[in-house]
Amino acid sequence: MQIQHNLRGGRTVVSEHNGARIVTAGRGNGYVQHAYVTRGGRSYYSRTYYDHGAYRVGIYRGYNYGGHQYYGYYPGSWYHPGFYGWAYQPWGSPVSWGIGMGGWGWGGSPWYGFYGGYFSPYPVYASPAFWLTDYVIAANLQNAYASQSAANSDPGAGYDQGPSNYGDGGGQAANSAPVTLTPEVKQAIAEEVKAQLAADQQQSSGGQAQAPAPANGEVPPALDPARRTFVVDDSITVVSDGQECELTGGDVITRLTDTPDADQNVTASVSASKRTDCGAGKQVTVSVEDLQEMHNHFEEQLNNGMKALAEKQGTGGLPKAPDTATTTSDVPPPPPDTNAAKDLTDQQAAADQAETQAKQQTAGGPGGGL
């Protein structure tokens, strides 16, 4: 069992037991992962997420690289190739899609007001890829706001809600200019969206060859030299200049190195951040596992965005798309593991006990009171 506390008091617990990988990121939520099927010599896993009474299930593909195991998101269905191509190509003329009920529907939403100084949607969309870019960024910020709200009834607790800083902890802005997600950073995210759409189109066409893995194993998507921009999906603790600092959902980092060190960490540069301790321009050390989970979340959100785009195409000024039908992938989604809630609760109890014992042992050591 691995127990890690972040800088804001949150706890992540990871354990492997009887073939199950169990990860809790807070009371009442997390996931349980089991081996599922093997296709073409590749292993696939079912992952059941449980969040305060709700289940959802996903498929993850195993990557053994450098003697370490990583897990990549794998869609349970694909759109037909023409829809991916339509989402990739520019529209004939830019499309206006506002934040009101006729568009995104964000107007008046607490999360949008809270992060309004950081994130601004495009005024018009030249192609579906930019629409999807705003969808992915917004989804991360909504999740970040919801997570903060769940951790504290005051969503601004520990965060400076002023326009110049989002969460320096002490309520004092450490920079004089507003923290914003710049057009350059958004463009980098849009390029990642386009690259993923092209990869999905190839996969849906059956055009991805099953090449044998190299001697060091198959490179996971998080280390693909062609993919360098990552949107942070959840609060994580990283190291910059020998000091720990925190990245939060909706921040953006750029991976600089391709080869992990002995601790399975790589170097990244912070492209956009709502906090000043991990401000833009800083170099940070981040684990490959955290990067892979960012990419997994990105793929899942992009898949959700494609579903929303398929439902809205042809309405509200959006051009009509070609065939939006789907085909079940070669690895169909498994049913949810309804024991996940109990497994997560049991793991939290075991982690509580382990930490209590560790404190008692520390107190009973040299100079201790026991």
Image (cartoon, rainbow, N blue to C red):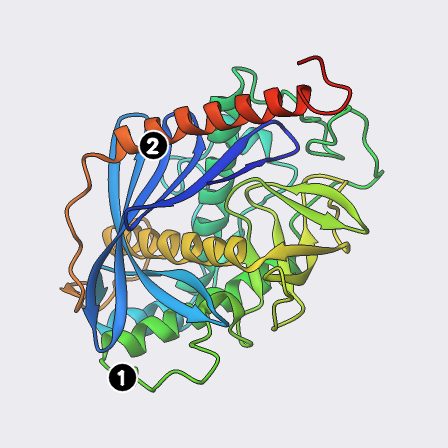
| Secondary structure category for the residue under label 1 | loop
Image location of residue 111, percent across then percent down: 51, 30
Mark nearer the N terminus (2 vs 1) = 1
Image location of residue 176, percent across then percent down: 85, 38
Quarter holding residue 202:
bottom left
Taking the image as shown, residue 91 lies to the left or right of residue 178, namely: left
Q: Residue at x 78, y 24 (%)?
A: 170
Q: Nearer the viewer, residue 30 or 342?
A: 342
Is residue 356 shown above or below 119? above
Give the amino acid type for the residue marked by disc 1 in the picture: Gly
Image location of residue 171, percent across then percent down: 76, 23
| Secondary structure category for the residue under label 2 | helix
Is residue 246 shown above or below 368? below
Give the amino acid type for the residue marked by disc 2 in the picture: Leu
Number of residue marks? 2
Q: Between marks 2 and 1, how big is the CA–CA gap?
A: 39 Å
Q: Is residue 91 visible?
A: no
Circle 2 packing at 10 Å, graded few (<14), some (14-19), many (20+), is: many
User: Which numbered circle lies on residue 274?
Assistant: none
Q: Nearer the viewer, mark 2 or mark 1?
A: 2
User: Which numbered circle lies on residue 344?
Assistant: 2
Q: Nearer the viewer, residue 108 or 360?
A: 360
Circle 1 packing at 10 Å, graded few (<14), some (14-19), many (20+), is: few
Q: Residue at x 32, y 56 (%)?
A: 303
Q: Residue at x 32, y 51 (%)?
A: 304
Query: For mark 1, what is the residue?
Result: 207
